[in-house]
Image (cartoon, rainbow, N blue to C red):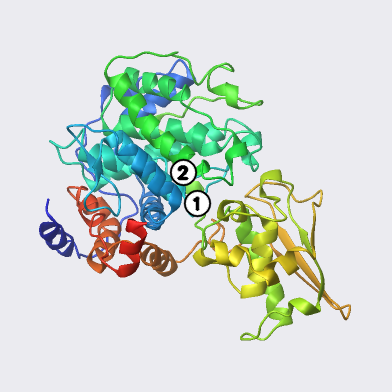
Amino acid sequence: MDVATAVDYIGSLRCPKRSTSRLELENLPVHPERRMLSKTVTESFANFIHGVTKSSLTEVVIQRSKRMILDTLGVGLIGTSTDVFHKVLKYSKIYGADSSSTVWGQSDVRLPPLYASFVNGVAVHSMDFDDTWHPATHPSGVVLPPLIAISETFLQHQKTSGLDLLLAFNVGIEVQGRLMRFSREASNIPKRFHPPAVVGTMGSAAASSKLLRLNPSQCREALAIAASYSGAPLANAATQTKPLHIGNAGRHGIESAYLAFLGLEGNKQILDMDSGFGAFYNDYDPQALLDLQTYTWLLEKQDVAFKRFPAHLGMHWIADAALAVRKCIVEEDDCFPTQNIENIKLKVPFAKYVNRPLPVSEHEARHSFQFNACTALLDGAVSVDSFNDHNLSRPHLHELLGKLHIEHPSDNNPSFESLYCEVSVTLKNGTTFTERCDTFYGHWRKPLSKEDLVKKFKANASTVLSRDGVEGIVETVDRLEDIEDCSVLSQFLKLRNNSEKYNDIMSS
């Protein structure tokens, strides 16, 4: 499908939205595999991946997953401007293949599907701007890039509909959510492994298996293979290596599914065993999935969080609390009086990798309670530009950082479901202002409006794509359940912005 055809196609879809709560997909055959009884947890997952149908996608699940897809495309596009993206793109260009897939935001670069998925996944997480779920993981960036790559290559001789994409996407999200719920420790901010490198690889394998239409035994083998690709230490958080966790999870999921299709075998009880997937969690307690006839998606009950600025999710609590304090101290247009500040106190949960008193890089700053609190106080906002080298080295910022100390109250659990952040600023005259944030705007308890989510996407995507590309993606995702051929997305993802800024980025 060429770009002109894509534009005409999207325009033809401007029809009233469905009013039903469930898609009316009648006359869908019930595959015999759906009636299989599962003897093991692993088999129950394989039967779910293979057997779940588009008719099970409720309106809530469809609308929430479309928001996730739009946000992921936006943060992936702005992520193509980062140094880490350019490094992995340069590396991936050494590989070639007869079939190739789109690299987002690049009109003149295509890569083999595994490496297109890899670099696009890295772009999604390169600024730590992507969605976050509970228990803690980044669910979308490990699933969407491989699905788009697969739809362009392995399935190029048959159309992949928007509903096909939505179903496979939700299978990948669901598998991640179910696996995390087999461990109580997974509910807290992680300490050892970065979750997307663990459950994300499994989710990518599940989504890829669904889109490739693997049978139940192949789905089971794909999960077993993916488990041997899973895992990345949290010590690489706040470095350029962390985005590789997302990219690797996506491409390893494709690889696992395709190797399973070719007959490669693994442990057939990989999800049942402490020495299998249980190796990642000390309190692993797996349970078989429920029967498909009465199945309820986790996304139906638990929405995701969308970030307003590119940083670790915990930073959004501290920024909102700091902004509330700032309003008590200064008028809207006034500068923050750094010279009048006696001290700053933060009450935050204990999580070592986001306790960084003096960050020296953009990636450390994205994982620093101290930096984000002081930036919000100083500027009245935290934004994409907050993490550039100039803003990191400002004397006024370092003056505030030097006056700050942290406390970890015993009631402040390190969980994205229950944590809070409190900021107290004491002036030299003895006056103290204190504000607390229990739920920031963008959290699943206080979700971004559709208007603000689209605004975020457009702000991100327009740094790379032309106006036609940006608007085309918004229209496509908005009507995704009605799209007959989702390759239209890839066409819009290549409509580059020819602005001077973009050309400067690409030539650097």
For badge 1, the amino acid type reads Val
Residue 171 in which image quadrant: top left
Image coordinates of residue 264 in percent, x first then y, are 33, 14
Under circle 1, the secondary element is loop
Foreground tag (2 vs 1): 2
Position of 252 with respect to 425 (left or right) is left
Image coordinates of residue 397 in percent, x first then y, are 68, 68
Q: Which of 136 and 45 is in front in this view?
A: 136
Considering only order in the chain, which callout, 1 or 2, is on the residue closer to the N terminus?
A: 2
Position of 418 with respect to 97 (left or right) is right
Residue denoted by label 2: 139
Image coordinates of residue 373 in percent, x first then y, are 68, 64
Seen at 26% across and 30% down, the residue is 212
Residues at marks 2 and 1, CA–CA distance in whole angstroms = 9 Å
Residue denoted by label 1: 304
For badge 2, the amino acid type reads Pro
Seen at 28% across and 20% down, the residue is 261
Q: Nearer the viewer, residue 312 or 87?
A: 87
Q: In this view, does 391 lie above or below 363?
A: below
Whether residues under marks 2 and 1 lie with C-beta atoms below 8 angstroms apart, the answer is yes
The C terminus - image quarter: bottom left
